[in-house]
Amino acid sequence: MNNYVYEVGNNLYINLTNQCSNDCFFCIRNGHDEMNGTNLWLEKEPTVADVLAQLPDDLSKYDEVVFCGFGEPTYKIDMLHELGKFFKSKGKVTRINTNGQANLVFGEDVCEKLVGAIDKVNVSLNASNAKEYQRICKSIFGEDSFEAMLEFAHRCQDLGMDVIMSVVDIIGKDEVDACQKLCDERGLKLRVRAFE
Ligand code: SF4
């Protein structure tokens, strides 16, 4: 079965794609096809109707609807727009967890498609500079992906979304400190996550 919808804690997660422009060494997809007992590897990517068909009847118990899944959700930017607006019409807070490379994937600025659909944008920063980012994340776009990711974050912030950059603590204290300095200089918020 393709699991397009799953729960983590008090949040409802939406799984739209396996595709990703990165190949991060810490990605949970490495050697796994499930999370918390839910198989997230998709044999078929969903339509909007496929996602809606798997939604629970009662959305009221969820704090947030999070577009995350096994791949990079912005590969499905039009679905994010449509589904995000649907969940907003139901009064839900919406979030994407993203690598911030959508504008490289599409070759144009697609951030406006998130306006009115997505409240929170969690961007994986992962490193303090382009060279280290590419070593960790192995983007198909090479080192250019780092600056493009920062520009994506700024663009979403300018468009009114609540943007938070994130790093995983396994990168080490010096790198975490350098990421904090970078975010301070760029006017971005940073969250440090514990590696699980
Ligand atoms: S950006 Fe996310 S989904 Fe893509 S490889 Fe990295 S951790 Fe995995």
Image (tube, helix red, strand yellow):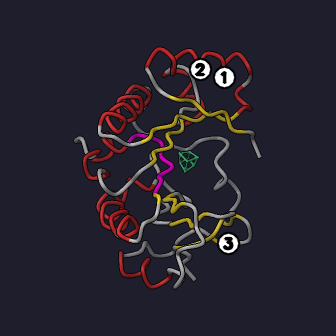
Q: Secondary structure at mark 1?
A: helix
Q: Is residue 127 magenta?
A: no
Q: Residue 51, position in %: x, y? A: 44, 77
Q: Residue 98, position in %: x, y? A: 47, 46
Q: Main secondary structure of the magenta part?
A: strand
Q: Secondary structure at mark 3?
A: strand
- Which residue extends farthest right? 196
Q: CA distance from mark 1 to mark 2?
A: 6 Å
Q: Are marks 1 and 3 in contact (CB under 8 Å)?
A: no
Vertical placement of residue 8 versus 185, above or below: below
Q: CA distance from mark 3 to mark 2?
A: 34 Å
Which residue in the structure is indicated by mark 1? 176
Q: Are marks 1 and 2 in contact (CB under 8 Å)?
A: yes
Instruction: Name which of mark 1 and mark 3 comes first in the sequence.
Output: 3
Horizontal relation, residue 34 to residue 132: left or right: right
Three-letter code for the amino acid on which mark 3 is drawn: Thr
Q: Residue 182, position in %: x, y? A: 52, 17
Instruction: Name which of mark 3 and mark 2 comes first in the sequence.
Output: 3
Which residue in the structure is indicated by mark 3? 38
Which residue in the structure is indicated by mark 2? 180
Crowding near pointer 1: few (<14 within 10 Å), some, many (20+)?
Answer: many
- Residue shown at the point (58%, 21%) measured from the top left: 179
Q: Secondary structure at mark 2?
A: helix
| Boundaries of the magenta span | 94-101
Quadrant location, the N terminus:
bottom right
Three-letter code for the amino acid on which mark 1 is drawn: Val
Figure quadrant of residue 152 = top left
